Amino acid sequence: MKIQSYLVCWDDYRDNCIDIESQFKLNGFSLTVINSGKPKNGWQNLGDIRYYRQFYYALKDFNFDNDYMLFICGDLSSGSWSSIMNRIMDVASRYEDIYVYAPHFTNDPWNFNSTNLKVSSVDKEISIATNTNGIMFLLHKEIVQDMLNFFNYFQEKHGWEGIVTG
């Protein structure tokens, strides 16, 4: 099971993104930083684009030899990315029918109770929900392909001009 990870960075969270990147490298996880702020060597410096265009970049860049794409927003912080990544890898390897997985982090405005459908009968730490808070999620490559098809269609029919924010 292979995961290709992307981190979205902008200037307000640059230091946090550097910390996340450092923790990923320290723990042997690869990471592509999609940077919309001040350029940094080794990062994908894309200029002033925001969430959906950053996500579209990740979709287009994704290598389908991988099983999953992990998308992380740069304002998420943790002192233990190795624990988070190990849990993600455990869930993705144990449950082959998971197509979207989002770890739940506390202290955010996302209301888990309003989207929770039920707790998994197989793993009490996994819930079936209608959506995630969008700050970090894992997508199976079939979902990545579907999303890429949608974004390509949107680009072809409407373009991205004028779309600055997410």
Image (cartoon, rainbow, N blue to C red):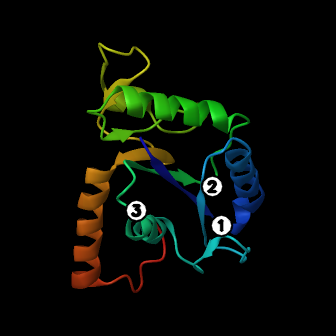
Single out the mark in the foreground, 1 or 3: 3
At horizontal 72% and vertical 45% (from top left) the residue drawn is 23
User: Are there few (<14), some (14-19), or many (20+) residues within 10 Å of tag 1?
Assistant: many
Q: Regarding mark 3 in the picture, which secondary structure is present there?
A: loop
Q: On the rendered structure, is 53 left or right of 121?
A: right
Q: Which residue is mark 1?
A: 10
Distance (Cα) linking label 1 and label 3: 24 Å
How far apart marks 2 and 3 lie (CA) works out to: 22 Å
Q: Quadrant of residue 42?
A: bottom right
Q: Earlier in the sequence, mark 2 or mark 3?
A: 3
The residues bearing labels 1 and 2 have C-alpha atoms spaced at a distance of 7 Å
Helix, strand or loop under label 2? loop
Give coordinates of residue 16: x percent, y percent. 74, 53
Closest to the observer, 39 or 22: 22
Residue designated by label 2: 74
Relative side of 97 to 40, left or right:
left
Q: Nearer the N terminus, badge 1 or badge 3?
A: 1
Pick whichever, 46 or 76, lies toward us: 46
* Marker disc for residue 85: none
Estimate the x, y position of residue 14 in percent, counting from the top left: 73, 62
- In the picture, the quarter occupied by the C terminus is bottom left
Say what amino acid the circle numbered 2 marks: Gly
Residue that carries the numbered disc 3 in the rendered image = 63
How many other residues sit within 10 Å of disc 2, few (<14), some (14-19) or many (≥20)?
Answer: many
Q: Are marks 1 and 2 in contact (CB under 8 Å)?
A: yes
* Place of residue 121 in the rendered image (x, y in percent of width and height, measured from the top left): 29, 13
